[in-house]
Amino acid sequence: AAKNRGRRTYTLYEPEMSVALYHRMKLETDLRHALSHDNGGLEVYYQPQVMLDDTSDQRMITGVEALVRWFHPEQGQIPTMEFIEIAEASGIIDELSDWIVRQACQDVVAWHKAGFMLNLSVNLSPLQLNNPDLPKELLTHLDRCGFDPQYLTLEITESADVTDTVAAAKMLSKFADKGISLAMDDFGTGYSNLGYLNSLPLNTLKIDRSFVMQITDNEAERKLVRGIINLAQGMGLKIVAEGVETEEQAEFLRSQNCEYGQGYLFGRPMHKLGMLKILNQQYEKLHPAIVLLEA
Ligand code: C2E
Ligand code: MG
Ligand code: MG
Ligand code: MG
């Protein structure tokens, strides 16, 4: 648009814009730096996923989702969506994702060695599905840190950024061949194309938080969630409800045969040491006499 207005427009240099632009460019530079230095403030946090159909007082943790955090050395915590978007726009999402996978696999392998056989879910950016080297790179990481692919789930979202859906489906089936699971994240909010959905080797469907939020005060929303659960069951998929915040929501979901839940009710995303503490507590209840892991 600026081009059409001729050479003497200064659209790109309006003061408010240049502040925003400067902020973005600074974050991009700092993010690149953080990826190559230990003190850049990047951390992987973990949020528990639990079995809803569990009558004991503390529901069993069956897996964790890795969620990246950035505690910027000068600016404090940057919202994850904000820097993921910057990483996507500036072509460093593959590198960032690589870093996250390596950290997460290293942490979860240590838990596996200690006897906590948890599943690990990692988010993929839709842009990564355009990178044909992704399977090789990811499998190399798993191999190097001795992570059993059976315990890995890749979360993808329905997105217009996947330019070649046939190629993406092909790539994802390479993961499936290695025993890696695939989850459709934020289900119901995207560009729902049931044909594409059906062409993917999916194992799990995650019901978006926006639906879960409303199930206890809205009958229409309850019907919708029932519909999603029926669809998932019909397709033979596991269901995880995200954003579960109240006992009432958890109970409704359980009554509808939704097997797994994730949300603040069961635990916020936390540092690996906090996660380990919770795992130890769970284990202690099951096997009171057994010596525990050191944090
Ligand atoms: P997501 O994958 O759907 O992750 C769930 C988001 O919901 C997380 O936000 C989590 O902190 C939040 N959440 C979980 N339970 C509750 C709850 O009970 N109530 C509320 N209000 N929120 C809850 P977060 O960590 O800010 O991440 C936002 C999004 O950014 C993620 O959505 C995902 O799309 C993306 N993202 C996060 N980490 C990564 C990553 O490592 N790689 C990539 N590519 N994307 C990531
Ligand atoms: Mg996710
Ligand atoms: Mg989600
Ligand atoms: Mg979400």
Image (cartoon, grey):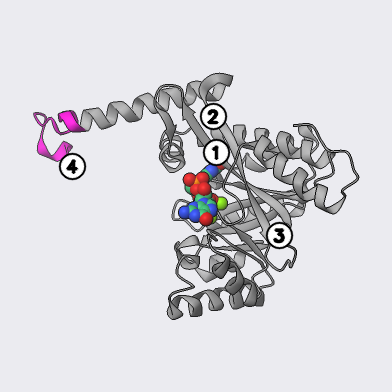
Amino acid type for the residue under numbered disc 1:
Val
Q: Where is mark 1, residue-wise? A: 68
Is the residue under label 3 in contact with that under label 1 (CB below 8 Å)? no
Pointer 2 residue Cβ closer than 8 Å to ligand 1: no
Amino acid type for the residue under numbered disc 4:
Ala
Amino acid type for the residue under numbered disc 2:
Leu
- Nearer mark to the viewer, of 4 and 2: 2
Dot 2 surroundings within 10 Å: few (below 14), some, or many (20 or more)?
many
Q: Is residue 16 above or below residue 212?
A: above
Q: 286 left or right of 7?
A: right
> Where are the magenta residues, as a range?
1-16
Residue closest to the eye, 165 or 145:
145
Amino acid type for the residue under numbered disc 3:
Arg
Between discs 1 and 3, the one toward the N terminus: 3
Pointer 1 residue Cβ closer than 8 Å to ligand 1: yes
- Nearer mark to the viewer, of 1 and 4: 1
Cα distance, mark 1 to mark 4?
A: 36 Å
Is the residue under label 2 in contact with that under label 1 (CB below 8 Å)? yes
Identify which residue is drawn at 58% across, 59% down. 184
Q: Quadrant of the C terminus?
A: top right
Q: Where is mark 2, residue-wise? A: 42
The answer to whether residue 71 of the structure is visible from this angle is yes
Between discs 2 and 3, the one toward the N terminus: 2
Between discs 1 and 4, the one toward the N terminus: 4
Q: Where is mark 3, residue-wise? A: 59
Identify which residue is drawn at 64% across, 70% down. 258
Residue 220 got which mark?
Answer: none
Cα distance, mark 1 to mark 3?
A: 25 Å
Residue closest to the eye, 87 or 16:
16
Secondary structure under badge 3?
Answer: loop
